[in-house]
Image (tube, rainbow, N blue to C red):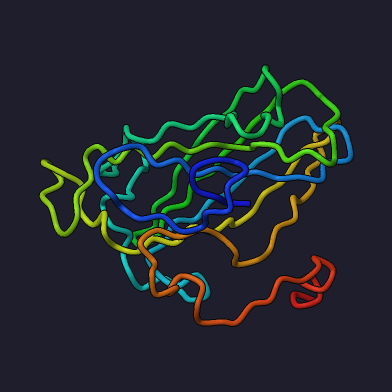
Amino acid sequence: MLSWGSCDSDQLEASFTGPGVYRQVISAVGFDAPVHGYSVRLRLTASNVYDWPTLVLPDAWRFDRPSGCQSEQLTVRTLDAACPSLGGDEVSFAVSYSFDGFDLEIWLLAGFPVLQPDPDTRYTLFALDFDHARSAPGPQDPAEACGGADERVCFVLRGARWNDPTMQSHPILFEPFFGASWEDGSDACFGDLAVQPSHWTAAKKLYR
């Protein structure tokens, strides 16, 4: 699940209210087997999530290193105060970025000693602190500020997997095309295709 603010928040939409840090949390529940690590792919796009990208992600959201306007402004953690970390206190993690000219994809990987989670507990996978101290609305000179903070951005999980003690990878199930948004008062991120929540078994049938 993606949410703004904290792990236990149901806030899916956020807006630019001025320079500062905006937190987005990726969390999950239902782990009923020993876990040795996990990975998440997060896509940031200015286009509707159902379509091929046609709009370039604004500079205010170019947190990719080393080329993005915000390349030093993203802090990643594996703990949020509202939910425990899935990896406990001994997590090591890595972050990588890919910008294709339109969208930004952030790859997040975590590893830790094998542990047995509580399947009824929601765990923090990653907390992303986007520092918008250099952000500003409208077009900006990148040397002075990162523009487009008032433009729509859509966030969607492209994939998430957990590793068992033998390092076999298994999917973390989530609702396809479900995510969070920024400055999307018109619901343009997810609004083109009517989607009703359904059991994952039913969703899988759509891709067979």
Judge left or right: residue 91 versus residue 77.
right
Task: Answer left or right for 151 relative to 142.
Answer: right
Relative height, residue 77 to residue 149 (above, below):
above
Which residue is farthest right?
Answer: 33
Name the spot of residue 136 as percent of width and height, x first: 19, 49
Q: Is residue 100 left or right of residue 145?
A: right
Relative to 9, does residue 189 appear above or below in the rendering? below
Q: Residue at x 82, y 73 (%)?
A: 202
User: Residue 67 in the image: x percent, y percent?
Assistant: 29, 42
Q: Is residue 36 above or below residue 147?
A: above
- Give the x, y percent position of residue 34: 86, 32
Residue under the image location 83 percent in, 41 percent down: 120
Question: Residue 56: which quarter of the image?
Answer: bottom left
Quarter of the picture holding the C terminus: bottom right
Q: Nearer the viewer, residue 9 or 69?
A: 9
> Which residue is more in the foreground, 135 or 205?
135
- Across and down, in percent, residue 71 comes to 31, 37
Q: What residue is shown at x 39% (from left), y 52% (from top)?
A: 99
Q: Where is residue 175, by image quadrant?
A: bottom right
Q: Is residue 126 above or below residue 49?
A: above
Residue in front for this viewpoint, 98 or 201: 201
Q: How many marks?
A: 0
Q: Residue furthest top?
A: 90
Answer with left or right where residue 178 lies relative to residue 18: right
- At x 56% / y 39%, what residue is drawn? 108
